[in-house]
Image (tube, rainbow, N blue to C red):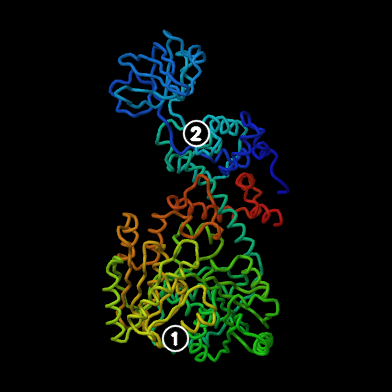
């Protein structure tokens, strides 16, 4: 696998080597994401123009694109510079005008002499009672009618690139595509009725009707599958590579885990029990674990993670639990302290706040192995942090840690198992695309005793009523979160919104009753405000979305979100999960500014109807598309040119199964199909995968 196969060279040559593409066009095409001829193959037409020949304009509902044979009549030159140059034409039944602006009369007389017959095609509109075709797209002799495509593909454009240019460039790229061996499983291909790769690219660029433009058209579906399959091959190679990495079997006798489970006031859910079993089985194997634990808000991930950490300790090693923020690290500490005491395990916390002698003492204890479970923020990555025997690293809210940091952590325990937790329910299609190389455990039940949360939509015009309701709730001893809107881009305006609301609520509810926390606060003040709310010194906490993840205040029963229509559904679902953690019935008020758009209302109603994060995430994906959902730029989500992650999730799942199977049957990709798959990886620019094979 030393380098790109020679037969693909023409597809990766410079754009200016394509027929009809000059140096200027070659500089504009990259704006369309086209860097090489190969990219033109996957830049498909998004619609088409029907240019079927008609006898006459008669009876066609205008405006419309019409193709018709006409006899050329009189020319009427423009009255002023740049005015309309009109040519009277007659078809079999009716007459209309061809109109040109900034026209050269001598040129048009030669092109369309009076009395001659020709076929014109273009958009016809009625203007002042007269049918006109302004600047026909085609005007050819009757003999050359085959120059007009019956169904003309329409490509995405960028300034300086015309449809004619795209048509020429894509045709030139198609011409250079060598015949390629089949990489798709023959049974899969036959069952789906897909053409060969070369036939598929030809057909996708030459649609004959609107049905050929649909994602389910065989040629397009095949190309989408090729993209998914190449992507899943990369993930499967990474997974296979990691599975050959030696881990260390961590097998505990279960006595510490039993002590904790016996002390719990409730039984774990079936989902928790199943997940704990999956994780301990992974830890017992000689391979390194790389598992994603996905669970909705309040599904009880922390207990599952702690059981895994105890397993590491029982096996004679150490575990670390990483949280994205100081507040969350301390909250994990508070939640796990009593459990650790039951188990007789030494638990400590390490954050950026630890300095000097205290920090040195913790580091020494960690290196001696006296600290068995460490809870921390990314301070754990610093060079001077060393473990005696790190067996398991648990990472909470993975999307905030880069892959690089996951690797750093791995280095601290050469063969440490890794468990990644997220409370963001990711729709299955995205989970396959983003975490396809990991094994996934899902917590899909809520622990008993969780109160359902009543969700209501309220217009901002009823602000006074909402504040009155708060006053009553506070008098009854309840607590409330008040989340202020996120204002576009600027942190300071978020701040102003939060501070204004804080002042106003304080004026109404009392100086002592209201706390404030936002992104600009120094960490110590933020923690102090959270702390005051947690212990009940303040009854209302005004916040920007910094409270999204994991903060636990059982007494908080009301969540008010202002301008809820500006938040993502997943984010609102996370916020709502901050209440309903105690015994009291809880309410979430989504305040919107009217008038609200139809989609805005639909989105908020999804929240009102469902408390299942996975259902909500699927809906969010349908309504907003992948990019918005996870901020494509930082998420490392693949970008597909033909495939559509949202609508073709099932295809992605097939690609994953197929890729894993091909690699288990042919780990070195040496079979005929394996060789073809290697060519696909080069064609799809999967450099990562290619590196994995070549160093393999």
**Which mark's residue is nearer the viewer, 1 or 2?**
1
**Cα distance, mark 1 to mark 2?**
66 Å
Q: Is residue 673 visible?
A: no
Number of disc labels: 2
Q: Residues within 10 Å of mark 2 (few under 14, many from 20)?
A: some
Quick one: SS at disc 2?
Answer: helix
> Which residue is rendered at x = 46% and y = 82% of the image?
530
Image: 517 above or below 613: below
Residue 523 appears at what percent x and percent y? 54, 79
On residue 532, which mark appears?
1
Quarter that holds the C terminus = bottom right
Residue 144, compared with residue 265, is above or below; it is: above
Where is residue 145 drawn, in percent x and y? 46, 17
Q: Name the foreground residue: 19 vs 188.
A: 19
Q: Residue lying furthest right in this view?
A: 2
Residue at mark 2: 203
Q: Position of residue 133 (x, y in %)?
A: 39, 23
């Amino acid at each position: 696998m030393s380098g790109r196969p020679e037969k693909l060279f023409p597809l990766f040559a410079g754009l200016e080597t394509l027929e009809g593409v000059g140096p200027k066009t070659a500089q504009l095409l990259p704006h369309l994401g086209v860097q090489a001829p190969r990219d033109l193959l996957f830049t498909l037409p998004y619609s088409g123009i029907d240019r079927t020949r008609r006898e006459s304009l008669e009876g066609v509902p205008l405006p419309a694109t019409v193709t018709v044979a006409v006899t050329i009549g009189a020319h009427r030159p423009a009255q002023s510079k740049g005015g309309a140059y009109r040519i009277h034409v007659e078809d079999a039944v009716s007459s209309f005008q061809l109109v040109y602006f900034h026209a050269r009369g001598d040129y048009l007389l030669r092109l369309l002499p009076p009395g001659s017959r020709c076929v014109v095609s273009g958009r016809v509109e009625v203007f002042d009672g007269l049918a006109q075709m302004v600047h026909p797209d085609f005007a050819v002799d009757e003999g050359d009618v085959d120059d007009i495509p019956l169904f003309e593909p329409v490509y995405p454009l960028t300034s300086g690139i015309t449809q004619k240019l795209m048509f020429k460039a894509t045709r030139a790229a198609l011409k250079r595509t060598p015949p390629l061996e089949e990489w798709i499983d023959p049974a899969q291909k036959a069952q789906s009725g897909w053409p060969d790769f070369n036939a598929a690219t030809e057909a996708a660029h030459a649609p004959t009707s609107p049905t050929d433009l649909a994602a389910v058209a065989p040629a397009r579906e095949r190309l989408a599958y090729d993209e998914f399959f190449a992507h899943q091959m990369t993930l499967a190679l990474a997974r296979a590579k990691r599975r050959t990495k030696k881990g260390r079997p961590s097998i505990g006798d279960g006595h510490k885990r039993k002590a904790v489970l016996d002390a719990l006031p409730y039984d774990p859910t079936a989902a928790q029990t199943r997940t704990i079993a999956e994780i301990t089985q992974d830890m017992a194997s000689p391979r390194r674990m790389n598992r994603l634990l996905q669970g909705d808000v309040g599904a009880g991930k922390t207990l599952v993670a702690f059981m895994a950490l105890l397993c590491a300790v029982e096996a004679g090693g150490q575990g670390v639990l990483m949280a994205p923020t100081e507040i969350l690290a301390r909250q994990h500490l508070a939640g796990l302290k009593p459990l650790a005491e039951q188990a007789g395990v030494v638990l400590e916390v390490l954050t950026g706040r630890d300095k000097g002698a205290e920090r040195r003492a913790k580091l020494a204890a960690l290196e001696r192995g006296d600290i068995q479970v460490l809870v921390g923020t990314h301070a754990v990555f610093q060079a001077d942090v060393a473990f005696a025997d790190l067996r398991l690293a648990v990472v909470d809210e993975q999307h905030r840690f880069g892959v690089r940091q996951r690797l750093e952590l791995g280095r601290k325990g050469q063969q440490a198992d890794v468990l990644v937790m997220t409370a963001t329910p990711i729709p299955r299609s995205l989970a396959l695309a983003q975490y396809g190389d990991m094994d996934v455990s899902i917590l899909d039940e809520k622990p008993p005793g969780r109160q359902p949360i009543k969700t209501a939509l309220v217009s901002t015009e009823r602000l006074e009523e909402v504040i009155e309701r708060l006053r009553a709730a506070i008098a009854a001893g309840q607590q409330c979160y008040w989340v202020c809107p996120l204002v576009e881009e600027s942190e300071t305006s978020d701040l102003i919104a939060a501070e204004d609301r804080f002042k106003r609520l304080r004026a109404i509810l009392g100086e002592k009753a209201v706390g404030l926390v936002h992104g600009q606060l120094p960490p110590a003040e933020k923690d102090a405000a959270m702390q005051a709310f947690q212990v009940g010194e303040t009854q209302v906490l005004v916040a920007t979305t910094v409270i999204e993840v994991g903060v636990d205040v059982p007494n908080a029963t009301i969540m008010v979100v202002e301008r809820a229509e500006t938040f993502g559904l997943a984010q609102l679902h996370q916020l709502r999960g901050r209440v309903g953690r105690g015994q009291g019935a809880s309410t979430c008020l989504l305040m919107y500014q009217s008038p609200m758009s139809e989609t805005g209302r639909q989105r908020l109603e999804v929240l009102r109807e469902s408390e299942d994060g996975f259902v909500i995430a699927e809906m969010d994906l349908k309504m907003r598309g992948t990019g918005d959902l996870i901020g494509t730029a930082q998420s490392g989500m693949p970008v597909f040119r033909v495939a559509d992650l949202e609508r073709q999730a099932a295809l992605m799942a097939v690609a994953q199964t197929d890729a894993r199977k091909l690699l288990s049957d042919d780990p070195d990709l040496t079979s005929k199909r394996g060789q073809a798959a290697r060519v696909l990886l080069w064609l799809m620019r999967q450099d990562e995968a290619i590196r994995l094979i070549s160093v393999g």
